[in-house]
Amino acid sequence: MKKQQTKWIWNQVYDQGTFLRVGWIHNKTEGVILDKIRVQINSLHCNLDFNMRLDEAAGLIAGVGKVICKQILANRISVN
């Protein structure tokens, strides 16, 4: 098994100890970027760390975007 390393490309800190970050997974020796991303979600109630393929991540992004749009149209989220 090849050694893999994560290069974090996005980090969002919400509160003390609560953050969300996303990174590319690549081979440590050759630096070849794989077609996977790594997602870490840490909060008071849950700590998740998982890998996703890029096509799975695109589906997740589309679903989250649709939910946010519906919430904005229903005036449940205010946009300033």
Image: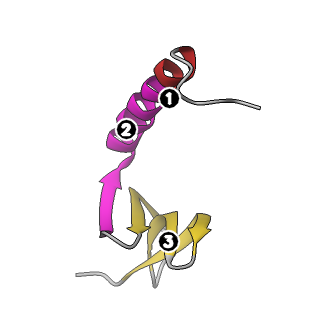
Q: Is residue 32 left or right of residue 60?
A: right
Magenta-colored stretch includes residue 65: yes
Residue assigned mark 1: 68
Select label 2 or label 1 by which is in front: 1
Q: Secondary structure at mark 2?
A: helix
Q: Residue furthest right?
A: 80
Secondary structure of residue under mark 3: strand
User: Disc 3, disc 1: CB below 8 Å?
Assistant: no
What's the mark number on residue 18? 3
Graded by Cα atoms within 10 Å as few (under 14), some (14 to 19) or many (20 or more), the crowding at tag 3 reads some
Q: Is residue 46 left or right of residue 69?
A: left
Within the image, what quadrant is residue 36 found in?
A: bottom left
The residue tagged 2 is 60
Q: Nearer the viewer, residue 28 or 44?
A: 44
* Residue type at tag 1: Ile
- Which of the 4 image quadrants contains residue 13? bottom right
- Please tell me which of labels 3 and 1 falls first in the chain: 3
Q: Specify start and end residues of the magenta stretch as a single range.
A: 47-67
On the rendered image, what quadrant is the N terminus found in?
Answer: bottom left
Q: Measuring from the top left, give residue 33's x and y in whole percent.
A: 48, 63
Between 70 and 30, the one lying in front of the other is: 70
Q: CB atoms at circles 2 and 1 under 8 Å apart? A: no
Query: For the point 55% across and 14% down, which residue is it?
Result: 73
